[in-house]
Amino acid sequence: MASMAVVNLHVSTTTKTHCTLSSPSSSTRKLTILPSHSLLFHLPAIRPLHLHHRSLKPLKATLSAVDTPAVTDGHDEGSKPLLEIRGLTAVIAESKQQILKGVNLVINQGEVHAVMGKNGSGKSTLSKVITGHPDYEVTGGSIVFKGENLLHMEPEERSLAGIFMSFQSPIEIPGVNIVDFLLMGYNERRKKLNEPEVGPLEFLQILSSKLDLVNMKSEFLGRNVNEGFSGGERKRNEILQLAVLGADLAILDEIDSGLDVDALRDVGKAVNGLLTPNKSILMITHYQQIFKIIEPTFIHIMDDGRIVKTGDIGLAKVLDKEGYKSFSVP
Ligand SMILES: Nc1ncnc2c1ncn2[C@@H]1O[C@H](COP(=O)(O)OP(=O)(O)OP(=O)(O)O)[C@@H](O)[C@H]1O
C-alpha cells in the first residue's frame, strides 16, 4: 500500500524542479529533479486507449533509401504532421561541441519512426534536444510540435504539450515511492486541465489497471522509483509511466536494450497498446527484433549528427547485412 505522502511540487522555469514530500512516517524531504524527470510531471492525462487502433495503411510502395532527405516522403495520405524538425543543429551547452549537424525529420500522427545509427552518432542527443534538455543548446533550425514552435517552450511546457521521453538509463529516485511519484505527475496534469485531483486510493486503482499492460507485479508499487530495479524492470517502469501519464509523442530511447525475450515482448506489446491513430512514437534502437513487435513506419539512419538514410523495414535488413559502413558520412 502506498504511503500517504503529501506532495508539494514546485516547477521552476529554470533548470530544476523541486518537490517536497512529507508523510506521517517520515520527515519532510526535499528533492531536486532535473528537467528530464520533471517532464513526467506535465504529461497529458490518460485518455481512452484502444488496442486495435492502427489504421495506418501499409506503405504503398517500398520506400527506397534516400540520401540526406529534406523531409520524409511516403507518409500516409491525410495524416497530420505532429513533429517537424528542419535543419536542426545543436551543441553541448558547456563545451560548444557540435553534435547535431542539420537533422531533418517529419513525424506524422500515428506513425512509428525508428532511429538507428552507430554509437555516438547523436541519436540520444536528438531526443534530448527535442525534450529541451539543458545540456544542449540549439544553434539553428526549427522544431515544430503540433504547429507550435517547440524551441520557445520550457521542458515542462513541452511535456505538457504531449511529449514523453523514456530514458536509456532511467535514474533511481531514492526514497520516492513509485505510486507517489506517478500520482504527483498525474495530479499535476489534472490541475493544468482544471480537473479535480485524485487521491491515493483512487489512483491506485487507475495504476493497477495499467500494471497488466506491462506485466508488472503489484508488489512493485511499494518500491521506490527504480531503486534496486533490474535493467528490464526499469524499462517496464518507464512504459508504466507512459501508460499512466499518456503522450502524443513518446520518445523511447533504447527501450529494448537489456531486455530478455519475454520482457521485450511485454514492453513491445504495451507500447503497441498505447498507440492510437493520432499518437506517434520515435524510438531509438540498435536491434531489429523490436520491429517484429513494434512495426516502424519509417527507419532512419543517423550518422555524425544527421539523418543520412530513410526507408522502411527493408533498410534494417540492409543494415543487418552490410553494417553501417555504407551509410556513413565520408
Ligand atoms: N552532455 C554531453 N557531454 C559531453 N559529450 C556529450 C554529451 N552529450 C552527448 N555527447 C557526445 O555526443 C556524441 C553523441 O552522443 P549520443 O549519446 O547522442 O549518441 P548515440 O547515437 O545516442 O550513441 P549510443 O548509440 O552509443 O547511445 C557522443 O560522442 C557523446 O559523447
Image (cartoon, grey):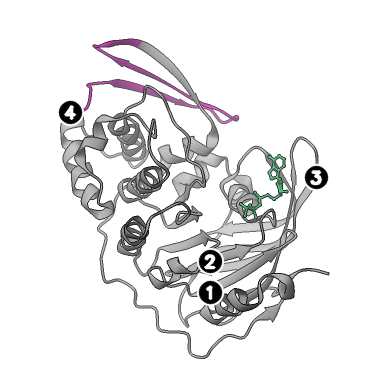
Measured as percent of width and height from the top left, residue 121 is found at 70, 57
> Do we see residue 197 in this rendering?
no
Q: Tell me the amino acid under the disc marked 1.
A: Phe
Q: Considering only vertical position in the picture, is 26 above or below 217?
A: above
User: Secondary structure beneath disc 3?
Assistant: loop
How far apart in space, not on screen, are marks 1 and 4 (Cα)?
43 Å
Lower sequence index among marks 2 and 3:
3
Q: Quadrant of residue 10?
A: top left
How far apart in space, not on screen, are marks 2 and 4 (Cα)?
38 Å
Q: Considering only vertical position in the picture, is 247 above or below 173?
A: below
Q: Residues within 10 Å of mark 4 (few under 14, many from 20)?
A: few
> Do we see residue 125 in this rendering?
yes
Q: Residue under circle 1?
A: 298
Q: Quadrant of residue 63?
A: bottom right
From this viewpoint, which residue is outermost toward the top?
Answer: 27
Q: Tell me the amino acid under the disc marked 2.
A: Ala
Q: Tell me the amino acid under the disc marked 4.
A: Met
Q: Nearest the camera: 127 or 258?
A: 258
